[in-house]
Amino acid sequence: MRVVRKRMQSILIIIMLLIFLLIGRLVQIQLISTESFSNHNVNLIEESVHQRTQEMVVDDGRGKFIDRNGQSLTSVTNNRLVLFPFLNEMKWPMQQVSTITGISTVEMVTKLKDTRSPVAVGDHLTINQLKQVNELKIPGVFGVPLKDKRPIPIAEHVIGLVRQSQEKIVAQYEDKLKSGELKTNTPIGITGMQKTFDEFLLPQQESKLLYHVDRFGGPMFGIDVKYTGDANPFYPVNVKTTLDLTIQEKVEELLEQYNLKEGGVVLLDIEKSNILAMASRPNINQTHPYEEKAKGLYNRMLIPQVPGSVFKTVTAAAAVEEGVLAPNMTFNCNQSIYDQPLENDHQKGMLSFEESFAQSCNKTFAQLAKQMSEKNPDSLDQYAQKLGLTDPVGWSGDVFHFDHFTQLQEGRGTVWEKDTNKHVPNAISQTAIGQLDVKLTPLAVANMMATIARGGEKRQVKIVDEIQYKNKASLYTFKNKKLSGENIEKQTVKELQQLLSQVVQSDDGTGRRFRDLPYSVAGKSGTAEIDVENEIVNKWFAGYFPADKPKYALVVVDLNTKSTISSTNQVFYDIVKEMYDLNHQ
């Protein structure tokens, strides 16, 4: 009997402990950790409300990117009919709504069937249709302008990606999480300008239509649908870029049309030193952006690439300014850079310096570089620096509490990886024609062409002009800035302008394909050997137009392509033509 009593006491003690543990857990959930439950900091109050709420997000509250004309680059606004699921349980004038909107009753019934969330039906309704629907004042029926992501992203490498990342948001915004300004599931920018400008773009509050429901999905407090939105006149902000949506769309269409698989385009406004369009290929895998096979996450226009003969522009600038060119000097273009005879179909005879540049004779520039290196081994990298090719060229400076804020995340160009190569003749020869260790970003090459076109003045390149408040007032304006460092001489610039024009105007020039364009073109072609055995090359054309009154600098590069199938010239040609057509509409 005593043993049974002890067992009963033990069981009662265990039961009481379990009850106390349960009470303690309930106290923790209900009173102590309601706003930061578990390691994931879940707000239980918000989650409870969310379970009893059906909502339609009208605007996510994150700041937007717009083009230079104020058009959205990240979203499209469609006027749509929004229907709430409790309409299934009531009679409402569906036919009248159908008559106003042109949306069939069958489509509305189908959309509402088996849904527990508000649904958007139809699109492209007119303002008048929205007005007529809302004047009916039918509970659960609204005509609303909804902001949706673009079905096909525009300038995706430039704009970048937004994703939920608890790890990144905790590392980056710990203070904002503690203060409650942000939640761990708040999407943040992880690439491109979404990342660079993230702190300006963070959402203050979503705008949404919502109603509260019971556990069966029926209205809890009647059928009044409420609108919640941020009444703040200043936020969310707009980041006003220098991109032109129309031009950007044309550029991306051409890259798809000509199936340029890896590479891209940079188009600059020379006078303002602004990026009008920038596109990179391959495209980003939007579902699995970091997947290794996709290889599309990074913007190829900001990554240093082997430039090939485009770099002869630098060698030419050094030769002109250093005075190594004698009058009537000619070069044996039947020979390679190693002084070996070329195959017959590659021989070009004895050419002048100007003819050598137009026809892209390797021997000439190898010979000149070796001659200059005897006197000044640093000549090639010095002139690359003068032309703005080795340092980042995007806008940088102090913005509010951000020291050294940069609009673009660029790689640095290189001319030499080893200083010892500056004294090796074959290494000098290869470097002079843009091979060996030479790597330049397409953006920097475009900026070099803009620098030459405007007379030699180097400027920082902008892709954002202004950060605007919601009411369009200016929060911050990015002023034009010069690139630091020495410029090339005015007379050298004139010589380069003439050389670049002859590439197109000469009967034997490598850019003669562009002579019949409505805008005159000046520029330089480039073919960089990447894999000689498999004939894999980088194909470039970099230039500016109109040649006589420059307005635009343009670079097109086709990377890791077969030497016989590049679409570089065709893309360059069509972009110039499109720009002419846009300016003469």
Image (cartoon, rainbow, N blue to C red):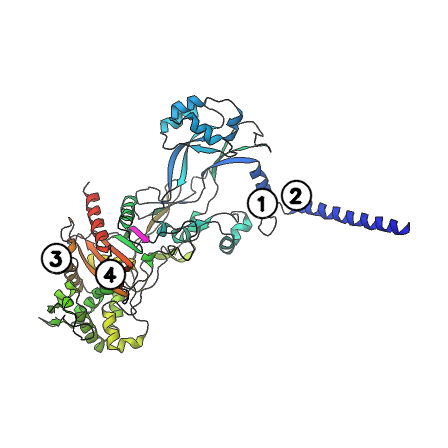
Examine the structure image and report whether residue 209 is included in the region drawn in magenta. Answer: no
Write the start and end of the magenta stretch as one range: 277-295
Q: Are marks 1 and 4 in contact (CB under 8 Å)?
A: no
Q: Earlier in the sequence, mark 4 or mark 3?
A: 3
Q: Which mark is residue 563?
A: 4
Q: Nearer the observer, disc 4 or disc 2? A: 4
In the rendered image, the residue lying farthest to the right is 1
Q: Amino acid at mark 2?
A: Gln
| Mark 1: amino acid | Asn
Say which quarter of the image contains residue 366: bottom left
In the image, farthest residue toward the left: 328
Judge from the rendering whether residue 514 lies leftward or rightward of residue 263; answer left or right. Answer: left
Q: Is residue 153 above or below residue 94?
A: below
Measure the alpha-carbon separation of dots 3 and 1: 69 Å
Q: Position of residue 564 (x, y in %)?
A: 23, 59
Q: Is residue 278 magenta?
A: yes
Q: Which mark is residue 43?
A: 1
Q: Nearer the viewer, residue 75 or 346?
A: 346
Residue 161 in picture, x, y percent from top left? 41, 50
Label of residue 505 in the image: 3
Identify the element where label 1 is drawn. Answer: loop
Disc 4 is placed on an element classified as loop
Where residue 165 sits in the image (x, y, percent)?
49, 52
Mark 2 touches mark 1? (CB < 8 Å): no
Amino acid carrying mark 4 in the image: Ser
Which circle marks residue 30 in the picture? 2
Which element carries disc 3, helix, strand or loop?
A: helix
Q: Nearer the viewer, mark 1 or mark 4?
A: 4
N-terminal-most mark, 1 or 4: 1
